[in-house]
Amino acid sequence: MAARAEAQGVAVDDIVWGVPYLPIDPKDVGRSYEAVIRVNSQSGKGGISYLLKSERNLDLPRRLQIEFSRAVQEHTDARGIEVNAEDIWRIFSDEYLPAEPGSGLEPWGRLRLVSTRASSSEDGPDTLEVELEDAGQLRTVTGTGNGPVDAFLDVLRQVGHDVLVLDYAEHALSAGSDAAAAAYVECSVGDDVLWGVGIDPSITTASLKAIISAVNRYERAQVEGRAADPATVGR
């Protein structure tokens, strides 16, 4: 560095060090990826999504990654702290996964899926009988449509929500015939575009739970005075 400074006619302290980016495996320095990744209000969606995938096997679609990273940033901004993988799971669960009865957690949202019974015929639409908990009251509503999801949207129209499914993704959470599935559904609800998430052993039920998740998030946003900004969900 002294020779370089002399050649440039400047002091050694004025030389700018050009250090290349050197990727390393955290295991080489006795650390884990989880210990290296620190999430705060300035963090992007990559680290957040990695922690959910490595810890919970949740492979979020890109636009959902963007939407959820905003929720994490709001959480860290409000508290001025970093969050770890367990904190991120709690934020994700609170945002997208209504508490099930007996979980000991406070439920949120107007709607909860209790049970479904589907039937179809070769020359007619599919029929879906749905038992819903609607604002604490059990209701049985029957909808028709081209498949169970379309019939479920008909059920939601009957209880006051006009929902349009814009995008959909799903995957198994583990190997085996009894593995649970995760469904991610992007919906237009009212004037908002937002995602819902459902987890269930049945991929069809997971999809319906994901739609309910989006509807409940929409209603909660109205109560809290916040709405999804389409510009922030990757469109």
Image (cartoon, rainbow, N blue to C red):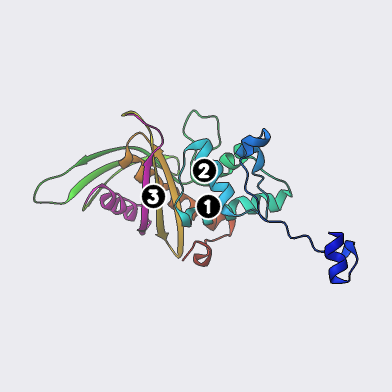
N-terminal-most mark, 3 or 1: 3
Looking at the picture, how far across and down is residue 184, in whole percent?
A: 41, 48
* SS category of the residue bearing label 1: helix
Query: How far apart are the two marked residues, 3 and 2, measured between alpha carbons?
Result: 15 Å
* SS category of the residue bearing label 2: loop
Looking at the picture, how far across and down is residue 108, in whole percent?
A: 52, 43
Type of amino acid at the residue the image marks with label 2:
Trp
* SS category of the residue bearing label 3: helix
In-image side of 30 versus 89 (left or right): right
Give the residue furthest to the bottom. 9
Type of amino acid at the residue the image marks with label 1:
Arg
In-image side of 82 versus 69 (left or right): right
Type of amino acid at the residue the image marks with label 3:
Ile
Query: How far apart are the two marked residues, 1 and 2, measured between alpha carbons?
Result: 8 Å
| Residues rendered magenta in the picture | 147-176
- Structural crowding at the residue carrying mark 1, measured as other residues with C-alpha within 10 Å and reported as few (<14), some (14–19) or many (≥20): some
Q: Residue at x 58, y 39 (%)?
A: 90
Report which residue position mark 2 lands on. 108
Report which residue position mark 1 lands on. 220
In-image side of 85 versus 101 (left or right): right
Query: How far apart are the two marked residues, 3 and 1, measured between alpha carbons?
Result: 14 Å
**Discs 1, 2 touching: Cβ within 8 Å:** yes
Q: Residue at x 54, y 52 (%)?
A: 68
Residue 180 image-quadrant placement? top left
Query: From the viewer's perspective, is residue 157 above or below residue 89?
Result: below
**Discs 3, 1 touching: Cβ within 8 Å:** no
Mark nearest the camera among 3 and 1 is 3
Report which residue position mark 3 lands on. 211
